[in-house]
């Protein structure tokens, strides 16, 4: 079954936090319509991969959606927005509070037009507080949560190239939207669901912040080396890098046997995870020397036999070629457009045994479904032609 069949979602988002939230709802069967500028959104070609200019980010964020164009600054465009809201179960937007008000997508306006509608917002800092009016992207969340500082080295902070704050915000907003839909079944009313990049980023770094608030260790960045146990680092073997993360006495004991250093089990410097974290540089040096003379596959096989979590550090191409990824269908090939251009698309992040989350159709071409959606709103062919002539759509 498709869990959200019959649920109508209008997505006014851009880039990741809003659009991916809407895509997750689309995966669950909702009828999701992406609304973008007449000339195309600024996120449509990031990074360009298709002959028509569509980007990889756009293809991922907008699968299982229909698409229409609309000039939100035009008076008649605003009239179309009101008609969309009347028919909406969910409106998704990741725009600053002031812009939402200007476009008629703020909570007061949406709720007045359609009390059953759920407004799902993803902002940089939330709708209140000193920073509420400021714009922000994923990297700002990484930076202001302490994660970027702690991911770097004493010489410089390091940003994660994958936008995990955006994705975390999108997933939290999707979860909140599902909760709001469930609540509406009981109350008959919609509500505002609001996530923010800073809120998500702080949630991810919270344990580190709790430690600082309670114990004030004033930790300094140390690259890939872990703080709370060891070995926990990246190591260079012959043929490539690997990552290892060992936690607990049992794993450490097995690691000592694996590297031929059983005496370390009784060394007082390494008696607990906390002490191993303090002295992790010594343990990393031992592991680095052990890896240096062995092939990467040999090292990974030994770690697997010792039941110590480890994996290869892949390039993007190696990730595409991994046999487990291929065997389990984690990046199935999809087709886009009439030319049948193909691309690997990660499926819905969780698998449900009795609920369909399958790929139904690729991201829409610019304005692909505009006429059909306007017709559903009651616009005649003549009305649609007039709107096109005025560049409202």
Image (cartoon, grey):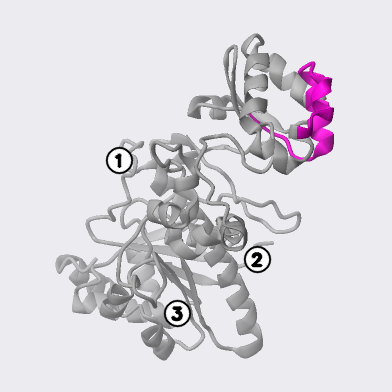
In this view, the residue in front, 259 or 115, is 259
Classify mark 1: helix, strand or loop.
loop
Upstream in sequence: badge 2 or badge 3: 2
Distance from label 1 to label 2 (Cα)? 33 Å
Q: Which residue of the protein is positioned furthest toward the front in this rendering?
A: 268
Left or right: 139 as drawn, with respect to 134: right
In the rendered structure, the answer to whether residue 190 lies left or right of residue 308 reads: left
Q: Residue at x 79, y 40 (%)?
A: 248
The image shows residue 5 at horizontal and vertical percentages of: 60, 67
Q: Residue furthest left?
A: 390
Image: 102 above or below 56: below
Tag 2–tag 3 contact (CB < 8 Å): no
Q: Which residue is mark 3?
A: 87
Q: Which residue is mark 1?
A: 52
Q: Residue shown at 66%/56% (left/top)?
A: 356
Q: Nearer the viewer, residue 149 or 6?
A: 149
Q: Is residue 239 above or below residue 7?
A: above
Q: Which mark is residue 3?
A: 2
* Residue 369 magenta: no
Label 3 vs 1, first from the N-terminus: 1
């Amino acid at each position: 079954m498709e869990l959200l069949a019959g649920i109508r979602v209008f997505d006014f988002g851009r880039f990741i936090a809003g659009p991916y939230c809407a895509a997750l709802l689309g995966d669950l069967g909702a009828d999701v319509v992406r609304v973008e500028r007449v000339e195309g959104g600024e996120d449509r070609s990031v990074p360009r991969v298709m002959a028509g200019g569509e980007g990889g980010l756009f293809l991922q964020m907008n699968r299982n959606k229909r698409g229409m164009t609309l000039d939100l600054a035009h008076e008649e465009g605003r009239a179309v927005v009101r008609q969309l809201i009347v028919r909406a179960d969910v409106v998704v937007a990741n725009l600053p509070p002031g812009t939402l008000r200007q476009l008629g997508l703020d909570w007061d306006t949406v709720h007045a037009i359609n009390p059953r509608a759920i407004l799902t917002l993803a902002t940089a800092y939330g709708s209140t507080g000193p920073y509420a009016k400021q714009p922000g992207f994923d990297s700002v969340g990484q930076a202001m949560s302490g994660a970027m500082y702690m991911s770097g080295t004493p010489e410089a902070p390091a940003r994660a190239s994958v936008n995990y704050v955006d994705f975390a915000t999108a997933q939290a907003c999707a979860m909140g939207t599902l909760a709001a839909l469930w609540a509406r079944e009981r109350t008959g009313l919609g509500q505002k669901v609001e996530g923010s990049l800073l809120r998500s980023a702080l949630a991810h770094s919270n344990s580190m912040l709790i430690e600082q608030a309670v114990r004030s260790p004033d930790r300094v960045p140390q690259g890939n080396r872990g703080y709370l146990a060891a070995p926990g680092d990246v190591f260079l073997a012959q043929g490539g890098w690997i990552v290892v993360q060992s936690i607990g006495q049992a794993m450490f004991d097995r690691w000592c046997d694996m590297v031929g250093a059983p005496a370390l089990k009784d060394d007082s410097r390494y008696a607990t995870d906390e002490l191993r974290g303090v002295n992790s540089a010594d343990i990393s040096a031992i592991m680095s020397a052990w890896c240096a003379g062995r092939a990467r596959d040999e090292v990974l096989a030994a770690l697997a036999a010792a039941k110590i979590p480890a994996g290869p550090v892949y390039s993007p191409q190696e990730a595409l070629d991994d046999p487990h990824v291929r065997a389990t269908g984690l990046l199935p090939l999809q087709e886009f457009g009439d030319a049948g251009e193909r691309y690997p698309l990660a499926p819905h992040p969780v698998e449900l045994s009795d609920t369909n989350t399958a790929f139904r159709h690729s991201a829409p071409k610019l304005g692909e479904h505009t006429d059909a959606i306007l017709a559903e709103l009651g616009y005649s062919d003549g009305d649609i032609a007039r709107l096109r002539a005025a560049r409202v759509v």
